[in-house]
Amino acid sequence: MPSFRSVSVIGAGAWGTALAAVAARAGREVVLYARNPEIAAAIAASRSNPKLSGVRLDSRVVITSDIAHGARADIIVIATPAQHLREAVTALAPHLAVGVPVVASAKGIERGTHQFMTEVISEAAPTAVAAILSGPSFADDVARGLPTAVTLAAKDEALAAELAQALGSSTFRPYHTSDVRGVEIGGAAKNVLAIAAGIVVGRKLGASAQAALTTRGFSELVRLGRACGARSETMAGLSGLGDLILSCSSAQSRNFALGAALGRGEKRPSDKLAEGEFTAPVMIELAASQNVDMPVSSAVAAILNGTATIDEAIESLLTRPFKAEG
């Protein structure tokens, strides 16, 4: 079994900083990479990140803007948004040791290629071993050491177990699996469905509508997962149902916040990235290629690209023919 003593986190946003805190709490040597030298210097000097107010970084976390330094670790965790993952891994690739695990922590599908996060890693850094970390969590909770359970997947389940051991602690509990695709679909789909849940709340359609949205959305998630080879138990676990419930019911979710703003008739928030906005059209294309019906997700995509108003999308969902469960 490999011995993982050091962890590099690539991306010094709120989530990356939280994951650096996780790795330090697990007793690892930690490097946090920020692409901007001024940001790296500021975080190093203050031991805090303005994006995580009130959270102080462990003194053992080294902050750097040197990508080669960031690549020298036993585990590399990529904490950039999904659409910037390829750029980050491409920059890292020349500096990576052969066989080093590179763990994506973004939830999405790459535009243009329709590739999932581990596929992007494998293509951009062929000598690395791709893995994915997903599940119901928010950066502020994780950084503060509040109890959190996530899922960590790699094709080699023994490796996934080792990675979980290396990053886990009493308050951050990764459950491991070899069902990479199930974890990736659960994470990507929930972002889109969280936008739908926000719209329901912003439109004041009631708690019953929100519950219906969550259950029907989960059915869509499972259908797509099965079509893409995911295992049922993963879709029903932390990477699927738990992530969906949290994101569809919490104001901390950026996707939920986007949907709520749209539901109230407001402009899209410009200060926060909502991954579901990028994922929705790609996921619908993927679903169509697999002959999977995803009406809720399709409605979200139509609202986002302006081909349907919210009222039209709601009417189309409510006038669909009654059908059997499944």
Image (cartoon, helix red, strand yellow):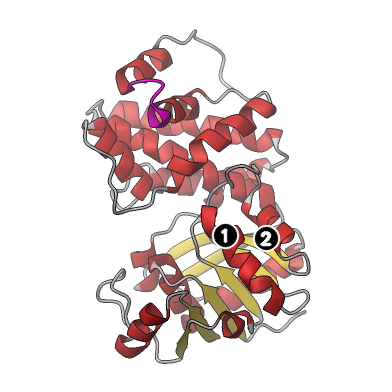
**Viewed as shown, does residue 297 lie left or right of 89?**
left
Q: Earlier in the sequence, mark 2 or mark 1?
A: 1
Question: Range of the magenta residues?
Answer: 303-309
**Viewed as shown, does residue 325 lie left or right of 59?**
right
Q: Position of residue 97 (x, y in %)?
A: 74, 79
Above/below status of 69 relative to 173: below
Looking at numbered disc 1 in the image, what kind of residue is underneath it? Leu
Looking at numbered disc 2 in the image, what kind of residue is underneath it? Ile
Q: How many labels were placed on the picture?
A: 2
User: Which residue is labeled 1 in the image?
Assistant: 85
The residue closer to the viewer here, 190 or 255, is 255
For the C terminus, give its image quadrant: top right
User: Which residue is labeled 2 in the image?
Assistant: 121
Residue at the image point whose x is 54% and y is 11% from the top: 323
Q: Secondary structure at mark 1?
A: helix
Q: Is residue 294 magenta?
A: no
For the N terminus, give its image quadrant: bottom right
The residue closer to the viewer here, 157 or 279, is 279
Above/below status of 104 relative to 181: below
**Which mark is on residue 325?**
none
Q: Position of residue 68 (x, y in %)?
A: 61, 83
One can see residue 106 in this view? no
Q: Position of residue 229 (x, y in %)?
A: 73, 40
User: Marks 2 and 1: CB-CB under 8 Å?
Assistant: yes
**Separation of disc 2 and disc 1 at Cα?**
8 Å
Question: Badge 2 local density, few (<14 within 10 Å), some, or many (20+)?
Answer: many
